[in-house]
Each structure stands twice: as C-alpha cells, then as structure tokens.
Amino acid sequence: MTEDQYARKAKEWTESAYADAATYLSHRADLVVALGAELVSGDEVLDLACGDGGLGELLIARGFRYRGVDSTPEMAEAAKRRLGHDAAVELGDLNDYTPPAPVAATTVFRAIYYASDRRAFFDHVAGFTEKKLVFDLNPRQYRLDDVLADLRAAGFERIALRAFFMPQTVALPSPAAALARALERSRPLARLALRFRFTYLVAASR
C-alpha cells in the first residue's frame, strides 16, 4: 500500500482494516504484554507505524503508557484524535525515529518490511528498548533464520515465537476464536499452517 493509500484510509483505518478489530487487536495486545519478557503496568510501549492508534487504545486500557509514531501525517492525526491526551503521538519514520527517553517495549506491526536495512533497524531499536521488541513476521516473505540472525547480531539473544492465527479479514465466532488461540500453542500444527497462511509474533530481548 502506498503513502497516498494510507492517507485516504486513515479516517477509520482500524474499523475498515479488520473484520473484528476488537478481538484481533485484543489478542495482539495480550501477546505484546505476555510474550517473552513480561510487561508490567506503567511500562511505556513505543508503537512504530502505529496507524490510527487502534492497538494503543487496548494497551492504555491495560495500564500501559503509549507512544505512537507513524510516517503518514493523516494516520498520526487520526491516532491523536482516537487517543486524545491519553497518549503521545508523533510523526516519524521507523528507520530513524528515537524516543525522548528509553521505552520498555517497542512494537512494529504490519510494517517490518519498511525497514530499509533490517539489521541496522534492529540495532537502532536495541539502543532505546529496555525489555523487548515485538513484531509480526510472515515466514513466507522472509526466512525465519535470517531474521533471527539479524536480531542476535543486534544483541537480542532471547527470542520467543508464537503463531498468530487470528484472521484479519474474517470475524470468527467466539468458540472458533478460542480454538484458533489454542492452536497457536500446538507447535507442529502451527508450523504446518504457517507454510500457507498467518504470521509469527516475535518477542526479542537482550
């Protein structure tokens, strides 16, 4: 998607991008907190490529401080409108943005491919992230071993992986959503499914 397309869709990005935004983003927020090094209430999360701040709403509701950054002015403005005074939202590029102070966690969702140099990006993020970096990864787009090697070269030695089976464009009934979350923990089935669809969530710590 181009910058212009993001700009045109910014007004109701969360509501239009997900068939069931509440379920999808709630599961993502839970894993941001629990996967790998656990976050605690009051920790600050930096969300690079934050879009309109839909994830921010759920992290704030869970007691975290939230800082959103997006390179599209219309998205940053939409995030400011959505989150109001509950969050800091800035215009910035994920490749070179540096927060004013270190953060507990940095997240990058549906945007890791915007890193112009992935290893340099991981190294940059390691400089201001105290607990963990969390991002989603399509293993059919990037070789998992290559990404893990880049993380370790940046000093992220502890890496937790979790399949993420919540569909973006289909709203699942509650029992099916619960089954999808349970299947994420079944490693053989998860690895098989990831050959064809879905993504990993990666949590990397030093």
Image (tube, grey):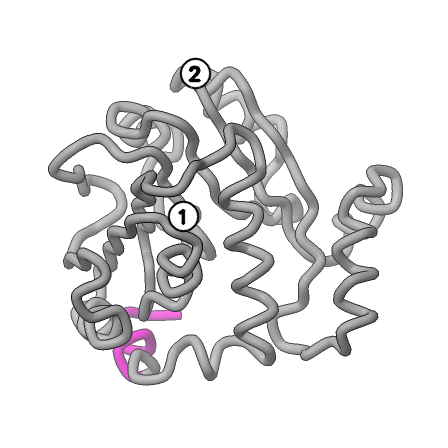
Give the left or right position of residue 11, taking residue 178 as reference.
left
Inspect the image, locate mark 1, and give the three-letter code of the amino acid beneath it: Val
Q: Quadrant of residue 171?
A: bottom right
Residue 4 coordinates in the image, percent (x, y):
26, 76
Q: Amino acid at mark 2?
A: Ala
Q: What secondary structure characterizes most of the magenta part?
A: helix
Indicate whether 85 appears above or below 60: below
Kindly report which numbered mark, 1 or 2, lies closer to the viewer in this rendering: 1
The residue pinned by badge 2 equals 153
Residue visible at 68% across and 56% down?
A: 198
Relative to 166, say whether 5 is above or below: below
* Residue that appears at 51% across and 33% down: 38
Q: Residues within 10 Å of mark 2 (few under 14, many from 20)?
A: some
Q: Residue at x 77, y 55 (%)?
A: 196
Q: Is residue 18 left or right of residue 175?
A: left
Judge whether residue 5 is colored magenta.
yes
Which quadrant holds the N terminus? bottom left
Foreground: 2 or 121?
121
Q: Secondary structure at mark 1?
A: strand
Name the residue tied to disc 1.
Answer: 108
Q: Position of residue 141 (x, y in %)?
A: 59, 48
Instruction: Give the image location of residue 69, x and y in percent.
Output: 24, 55
Q: Residue at x 54, y 19 (%)?
A: 158
Classify mark 1: residues with Cα within 10 Å, few (<14), some (14-19) or many (20+).
some
Q: How many marks?
A: 2
CB atoms of marks 1 and 2 within 8 Å: no
Residue 71 located within the stretch drawn in magenta: no
Q: CA distance from mark 1 to mark 2?
A: 19 Å
| Quadrant of the drawing holding the C terminus | top left
Give the magenta-colored segment's residue range.
1-8
